Amino acid sequence: MMGGATGQALITLRSEKVGSLDLRPEVVPEIVGIAGAAARFAWEEFFQGELANCHTRTAYLRAVRRFLGWCEGLGLELGRITPGHVGKYLSEHPGSIPTKKQHLAAIRRLFDRLVVRHVIILNPALSVRAERYQVIEGKTPEITVPQARTLLGSIGTKTAVGLRDRAVVGVLIYTAARVGAIARLTLRDLRHDGTQWTLRFTEKGGKSREIPVRHDLERFLFEYLEAANMEPTRSGGPLFRTAVRRTGVFTGNTMTGGDMCRMVKRRLRAADLPGHLSPHSFRVTTITNLLEQGVPLDEVQHLAGHADPRTTRLYDRRQKRVTRNVVERISV
């Protein structure tokens, strides 16, 4: 736990900022620092102990710092913040309803921690409600099956980089995996179980699952590995690696999710396909395609790695397409 002097020193440190907010969890906001040692302990416990996922931590830091900065502007102390203040802040918030709900969740959880550590008596965000928001269809654009085939066919396979890119797109299509999980694949994650080759993915929340490699994807992967002079091994190393500029020589560094997103965008442009598509579009297509073929929802849910079937249904575009025939029939 930080002492008073240390806490104040951290408060005055030069910020490493994203936008106008300091997103370092170890830097305690002034309104928390002046509330005492227990408040600083609760801050550290919440952001450096409770929130294990780095993306959640960053999002919650952004939300909480923005709210606490708003409170400081009003001259409030932690113990004087009321449900009315939280409600007024949300009503003035310029973000979308989902953003407001995320910010409310972050504020509520931090104040829960402050209550547990006896910094305040009641959580002022507990009784506050955000606007209702119901998602009936995901926003990710779908790439059609013909478009996916066009993209695969457009990737040149005379170079090792082309073979790598085709293998990445193949994994996106034939496993429905998230691009982040694909970026984390290592050579030892491609394994043979005695009957078939599988890919072991580490998904969101630390969940691990294995997906069989279908025959054409197996060919994509091993043609890439042969060209890159690599093979599945217990010692690991990145499965998909970056290349040195235009030389086609692979480094020992892994392709990040961002690298894969940029690669897919380049390949889409080269194939004259819509630029609004993304790696996540393949996930929508694979899920919809399997449901169209009558594959049970629970099996598709398991492939997608969803904990709730309602999440899988958000990717189902079968009954949610408005056709040209429908709008042409409007008789105005």
Image (spheres, rainbow, N blue to C red):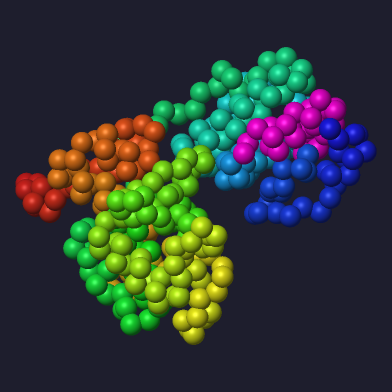
Inspect the magenta stretch and tell me whether residue 217 lies in it.
no
Q: Camera-side residue: 251 or 120?
A: 251
Quarter of the N terminus within the rendering? top right
As displayed, is residue 324 above or below residue 91? below
Q: Position of residue 267 (x, y in %)?
A: 35, 72
Residue found at the far bottom of this picture: 247
Looking at the image, how many numbered discs can be counted on the residues?
Answer: 0
Q: Position of residue 295 (x, y in %)?
A: 19, 40
Residue found at the far right of this picture: 5
Residue located 65% across and 22% down the image: 112
Residue found at the far top of this picture: 121
For the question of whether residue 248 can be seen, the reply is yes
Q: Which residues are magenta?
A: 29-52
Q: Camera-side residue: 216 or 325?
A: 216
Residue located 65% across and 32% down the image: 50
Q: Main secondary structure of the magenta part?
A: helix
As displayed, is residue 318 above or below residue 16? above
Q: Position of residue 14 (x, y in %)?
A: 81, 54
Q: Camera-side residue: 288 or 330?
A: 288
Q: Position of residue 83 (x, y in %)?
A: 62, 21
As displayed, is residue 265 above or below residue 23? below
Give the left or right position of residue 97, taking residue 6 as reference: left
Q: Camera-side residue: 230 or 26?
A: 230
Give the left or right position of residue 261, taking residue 170 as reference: right
Residue located 59% across and 20% down the image: 126
Residue found at the far front of this picture: 194
Inspect the magenta stretch and tell me whether residue 32 lies in it.
yes
Give the left or right position of residue 80, taking residue 181 as reference: right
Which quadrant of the view contains residue 303?
Answer: top left
Residue located 45% across and 54% down the image: 189
For the question of whether residue 262 can be seen, the reply is no
